[in-house]
Amino acid sequence: MRDIVFTRQSGWIPNVIREDGELKLMLGAGADANHEPRTFTFAIREAHLGVIQEDLARHLLLWSAVLPLCDAAGTRGRLDENAAITLLDPVLLATPADVDALFRRIPWDRRRLIAHGADINLLERGQVCAAMHAATETPNEKRAQEYRANRRRTERGAALRPLDTALLKYTGQYLHGATVPGRMPDAVDPALLPEVIRVIATAEQAAAGMRIGRDPRRGRRATDKQDWERMATAVDAAVRRAHPELVDEAVRTVGFLMCSEAADRSRSSPLEDDAETAGDHAPSGGAARRRPLSFTDGKGVGKKWLPDGPRTATAEFWEFVGDRSAVDNEVFTIEDEAMGEGIQLHFYADSIARVTTVREGAVDGPDPEYRVEYSLVDGIGGYRNLVSAFVRGGCAALGHHGPWLSDVTEFERVRRRRDTE
């Protein structure tokens, strides 16, 4: 039989229960192997209950001291109840000086106290009792997150100036550097917002005219890593040149914002627009493709493109790649059967083969003869150019995209040399 004897407004602060006639402190902490919260209990006395009811600060200090024991229990271990019980008198009943001395010897959860209003400067000086003079039952988790983020910065020797902090808050990366950045002017001190906007304007000017295309080799929404790195480098250089006082983290967050926005624009644009930017369409006055093409992947799945369809051949092909590409499916082919030629893209090796028919086969006659030539490819941008050139003009249009090697052994030597550089 379990009855709640005392509880506070915040459900996470430990409760006091009576279980089978015995007073116990009950708290939730950590998670089990199924990611469900774990619950721990250990015995207390009436004297401890009195302090817990009357003194929020001591109650929170006890919670902070017990949490490391819960962490040590892991996902399935037992709480060291003896260790927890030995904390009761020193935390709840001892003098403030003795409590401060205890907290200098034991592990404790600093962030819990900060979330509940502890004075950070006093905590840092080891005056834990005095630090809890303005403790609150309702936690402010953002305050604890900011403390943790700043502590990590201090540990790696990074000191933020006001403008650095404002930029990180503007992009939403002050607490978590991995958060997808956005534009949040309301999070910035109004006095610093004009300076923040000037830095952002510098970055926008540096990124003007640049784009981040998609990379269907990694899925329909993946973007080109090389484009991302080019834009990040350009923005980084411009911001550092115009604002040399900014720390690295502030400069990176501005570059991350520019790249993320460019990538989002690319993902939301139709594939036709993406292909056109990569050079899909023939120049003004050029002839449109009039023959069908066949697309296949490494698993034998195929798709046919017809000239009278509503979409371009390259858009159809790259959509096919985005749908089918995987770690075990990295070879794709485009074939013009009427002309007896095609290209094979080897994404795993950043290479391509062009195949032309030298001699047609015949029934009961000799097998067809093909000429196969290989070339290296520089990322998805290189693949896009080659595919667009083949779609417009067949294998003949690929000549100036070489060099092309017909000797497989020589080509593998060249490829290995590139991969080791």
Image (cartoon, rainbow, N blue to C red):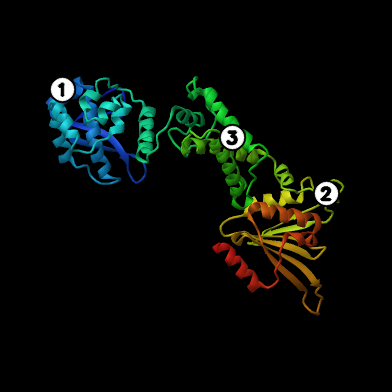
Q: Which mark is residue 308?
A: 2
In the rendered structure, which amino acid carries the disc numbered 1? Gly
In three-dimensional space, the C-alpha distance between marks 1 and 3, rounded to whole angstroms, equals: 60 Å
Quarter placement of the C terminus: bottom right
Disc 2 is placed on an element classified as loop
Q: Which mark is residue 332?
A: none
Q: Residues within 10 Å of mark 2 (few under 14, many from 20)?
A: few
Q: Nearer the viewer, mark 1 or mark 3?
A: 3
Return the residue at label 3: 203
In three-dimensional space, the C-alpha distance between marks 1 and 2, rounded to whole angstroms, equals: 84 Å
Residue 302 lies, in percent from the top left, at 70, 58
Return the residue at label 1: 50
Q: Residues within 10 Å of mark 3 (few under 14, many from 20)?
A: many
Position of residue 278 in the picture relative to residue 186 (left or right): right
Q: Residue at x 80, y 66 (%)?
A: 340
In the rendered structure, which amino acid carries the disc numbered 2? Asp
Q: Residues within 10 Å of mark 1 (few under 14, many from 20)?
A: few
